[in-house]
Amino acid sequence: MTTDRQTIEQIVIAAIEKHFGDQSPPRAQPDRVAVEQDCAPSETVESNNCVISDKVVTAEILEAQINGHAAFQIGERAVLTPSAYDYIHEHQLNWSRGTEVRAENRSAAFLAAVVSATPHVSRIFDELAGGWTLELQANTRVSARKAVSAISRGEVSGVAVVSGKPQVVSCLVNRSPKVRAAVVQNLAELNAAIDEIGVNVIAINPEQFGGFQLRQVLVQFSENLPQAPDAWESLSRLW
């Protein structure tokens, strides 16, 4: 990586540690050349997968642990850094999350794909009740891809993408037939999106919200299990 990329990487890791507070994940070591255990197939994943237990997954960790595998699995709350996304793209790897959440609770899971990690955004997610998982995303494109993947695979019931470009996010994710996304700027717009399309992805610009308003929207979103309207499948085929 260049010096600029290293700086970005350290900023991301620092933000993750700040979010997790006293339970912050261990800082990745760039010069790491050995790991405690080679990555090996697990009984819980396909034979061409390996399991990476690190809480913060960087390119260096992937390079050290992938060991020739075409796919890997990380923990439910683990975070992929920008360099990890670059490594995944360069080596055309597939990845997934573990299944620590029991099946009966999975329908209540919501993901926050955060590009704009302002201090009040991190604080609000710290205060939210269980059911939310926060993941820092490298950019708007990556956050949109993550939202589509999580919804399409049934990993979560809904996704809140927190980005300075919510219109772009909404446009990108709505290309998937599984996604019903809307840009939300206040509680009234969220309620309309819930009633009209059973919204399962909301795009939010944190600069347009105060702390109380943002928390109110996120709570309301997670308290309504997204459901597609009647005849939505037929309506979605109009074009």
Image: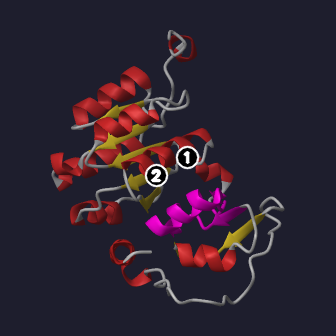
Viewer-proximal residue among 145 and 154: 145
Can you give x and y, in whole percent of width and height, for residue 98 in the image? 65, 62
Indicate which disc, 2 or 1, sits on the residue closer to the N terminus. 2
Q: Are marks 2 and 1 in contact (CB under 8 Å)?
A: yes
**Vertical comparison of 65 with 196: above or below:** below
Looking at the image, residue 203 lies above or below residue 112 = above
Observer-nearest of 169 and 135? 169
Residue 129 drawn in magenta: no
Density class for disc 1 (Cα within 10 Å; few <14, some 14-19, many ≥20) is some
Residue visible at 33% across and 41% down? 203
The CA span between labels 2 and 1 is: 8 Å
Magenta residues, start to end: 71-100
Q: Is residue 163 visible in the rendered structure shown here?
A: yes
Q: Residues within 10 Å of mark 2 (few under 14, many from 20)?
A: many
For badge 2, the amino acid type reads Leu
The residue identified by callout 2 is 111
- Give me the residue at 52% from left, 73% from top: 58
Q: Can residue 81 be seen here?
A: no
Give the residue type that dot 1 points to.
Ala
Q: Is residue 23 left or right of residue 35?
A: left
Q: Secondary structure at mark 2?
A: strand
Q: Is residue 80 above or below residue 196?
A: below
The dot on residue 150 is: 1
| Location of residue 170 (image quadrant) | top left
